Image (cartoon, grey):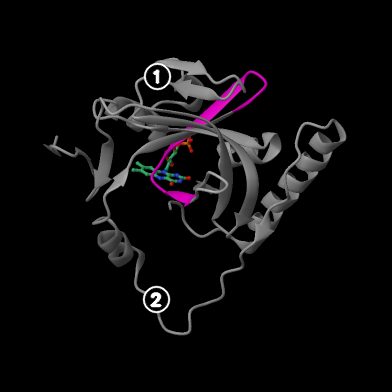
Amino acid sequence: MSGDALPYTEHRHFAGRMRSGLESELTTAMADFDLPDTMRLRPARRPVVGSAEFRAAMSAMATTVSVVAARRGNERVGRTVTSVLSLSITPPAILVSIDIMSRLADVIARTGGFSLAMLAEGQQSVAQAFAGQVEPEERFGSTDWTEWPSGHPLLLGAVSALDCDVIGSIETGTHVLFAGAIIEAETTTSRSPLLWQRHHYQGLTGVD
Ligand SMILES: Cc1cc2nc3c(=O)[nH]c(=O)nc-3n(C[C@H](O)[C@H](O)[C@H](O)COP(=O)(O)O)c2cc1C
């Protein structure tokens, strides 16, 4: 997960925004998912490690680089993520962790859906664009994007692509964990995934 700890008041402010947004959506029957529950994190009983030490240790983890995207009207938003978990087979569901203060978290909460594209080796420029190197409103213009029947963004050339309906969410303080039921899925065995490890993009076949 990314992002620094946020003041308590900002967390509550975000939850309030999500709730008021959902209420207005519900009156127009656009969203039919639960309000986010809060997983309140209590202080550890023992001193925790510093963030640099934590980041260094966690950087050993090799993860597939993905882009989570959502749409509200004409607005498309997306960001590069590595915090993705295959949650369950029944129902088919994943969990993604999205920075609570991001526009993406807000749009997912308001619309009740998102898409996920697991990037392929060779899509490093997409990863960099959606990690902040390209302005949010220009990210979808520079790549090969189409859309799912739901209207959620669909990236061509990914290793796997999923379209999801939100079936649950938990606010942790700095992030929202969205559980998404898989409505559509595409995959190919002809491409290899783009990995992130030790602060670098890598492939299964070697470091680039
Ligand atoms: C390798 C990598 C993994 C990331 N994983 C996540 C993640 O799981 N969740 C998240 O909210 N942000 C994650 N980020 C950060 C966002 O991609 C980044 O902060 C964001 O795109 C910044 O642009 P924006 O805030 O203008 O959208 C990750 C970034 C990188 C480079």
- Magenta span: 71-87
At label 1, which amino acid type do we have? Leu
10 Å crowding of disc 2: few (<14), some (14-19), many (20+): few
Tell which circle, 1 or 2, labels the residue nearer the N-terminal end: 2
When asked about the image quadrant of residue 170, the answer is: bottom right
| Side of 202 where 39 appears, left or right | right
10 Å crowding of disc 1: few (<14), some (14-19), many (20+): some
Question: Which secondary structure lies at badge 1?
Answer: loop
Residue 12 spot, x, y in % from top left: 70, 57
Q: Which mark is residue 52?
A: none
At label 2, which amino acid type do we have? Val
Residue at 82%, 37% (x, y): give it: 26
Residue 59 spot, x, y in % from top left: 27, 55
Number of the front mark, 1 or 2: 1
Residue at 45%, 26% (x, y): give it: 135
Residue 97 spot, x, y in % from top left: 50, 49
Residue 110 spot, x, y in % from top left: 70, 37
Question: Which secondary structure lies at badge 2?
Answer: loop
Q: Do we see residue 100 in this rendering? A: no
Q: CA distance from mark 1 to mark 2?
A: 42 Å
Establish if 7 lies above or below 131: below
Q: Which residue is mark 2?
A: 48
Q: Do we see residue 42 in this rendering? A: yes
Quarter of the image with the C terminus is top left
Circles 1 and 2, Cβ within 8 Å, touching? The answer is: no
Q: Which residue is mark 1?
A: 156
Q: Quadrant of ligand 1?
A: top left
Q: Is residue 99 magenta?
A: no
Q: Residue furthest bottom?
A: 45
| Side of 120 where 77 appears, left or right | right
When asked about the image quadrant of residue 108, the answer is: top right
Establish if 155 lies above or below 112: above
